[in-house]
Amino acid sequence: MSLAAAGLLAVGLAGCGAAADDTAPAAVPDAASETTEPGTAESKPAEPKTTEAKTAEMTQATFVERVGGAQESATTMHIESSYSGALAEAAGLAGATIPMDVDASDPESPRMSTSMDVQDKGLSMIVVDDTYYISVGEATDGKYVKATEKELMSDPAMSSLQSMSEVPNPRAQLEGFKDGIVSFEASGTDTVNGTEVDLYTLVLDPAKVTGPQVEQLDPEMVDAMGEMTAVYALDKSDRPARVAVTMTVDGQELISTAEFSRWGEDLAIEAPPADQIVQR
């Protein structure tokens, strides 16, 4: 089984994408934002709002709704993904870090940019306005090839890149995991990149997971997976700072780790300039 196929559940579980809809809750204002009291022109830092996400105990019953809603309320993020374990080593991805910026402010046309090493070649990809810009080092003279999704899917050498650029809906993903949760527990606290986080450990049965993260998997692939363990590190707004997923496929361990940052920031994902685009 390929690492990509084995990792689909892990990537979906990490929720490493964002989507917005009309029902997404409003973001809680940052404590550093300013507010003006009635009858005065002076402003002062706003008091942090006390929310259920900050005060109520997280439970298995509330986990999906709270974490899914928190991600929907911030439609931009930066993700650093890495793989380890025997299966990652066999695929040549152990130790590598894959950065990705995601901007789903427009859910109908999300933007993303990523870069990685594939077969000792540097690959960069930018998606803007449903158009793909792909650079493969010397193979494209350090510039970008431009393609529509239809053109990308018609090229066997490039079609696999389309699935890498998808920005899934985290609420739909988490809803799909709900029936697959075998156990759930609060497992302490930690610090991730200077952020204090609460840890939650979920054990899942892949055979009971539904939704977009399993639709592309052959049932035999799912049968080859053992129970999955996911450790969520959540910030005070219930947004993931880190998600580490461990699974075993045909006796080989795969650990997928995603670290999240820059929630809600302007990531300035833009198409390359015209002089950096080459013809296919």
Image: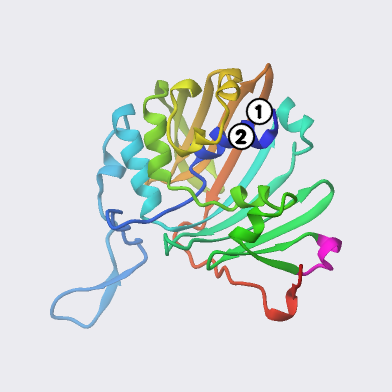
Most extreme residue toward the front is 154
Say which quarter of the image contains residue 182: top left
Residue 125 vs 172, above or below: the answer is below
* Type of amino acid under label 1: Leu
Residue under circle 1? 254
Q: Quadrant of the N terminus?
A: top right
Q: How are the colours assigned in the image?
A: rainbow
Query: Residue at position x 79%, y 55% from top?
Result: 122
Q: Position of residue 119 (x, y in %)?
A: 82, 46
Mark 2 surroundings within 10 Å by alpha-carbon count, few (fewer than 14), some (14 through 19), many (20 or more): many
What segment is highlighted magenta in the picture?
137-143
Q: Secondary structure at mark 1?
A: strand
Does residue 190 show up?
Answer: no
Query: Residue at position x 86%, y 63% from top?
Result: 138
Residue 74 vs 203, above or below: the answer is below
In this rendered view, identify the residue nearer to me: 84 or 22.
22
Residue 61 vs 23, above or below: the answer is above
Spatial CA span between label 1 and label 2: 8 Å
Residue 247 lies within the magenta run: no
Q: Nearer the viewer, mark 1 or mark 2?
A: 2
Residue under circle 2? 7
Q: Position of residue 277 (x, y in %)?
A: 73, 74
Q: Position of residue 187 (x, y in %)?
A: 45, 26
Residue 138 lies within the magenta run: yes
Query: Residue at position x 18%, y 74% from top?
Result: 37
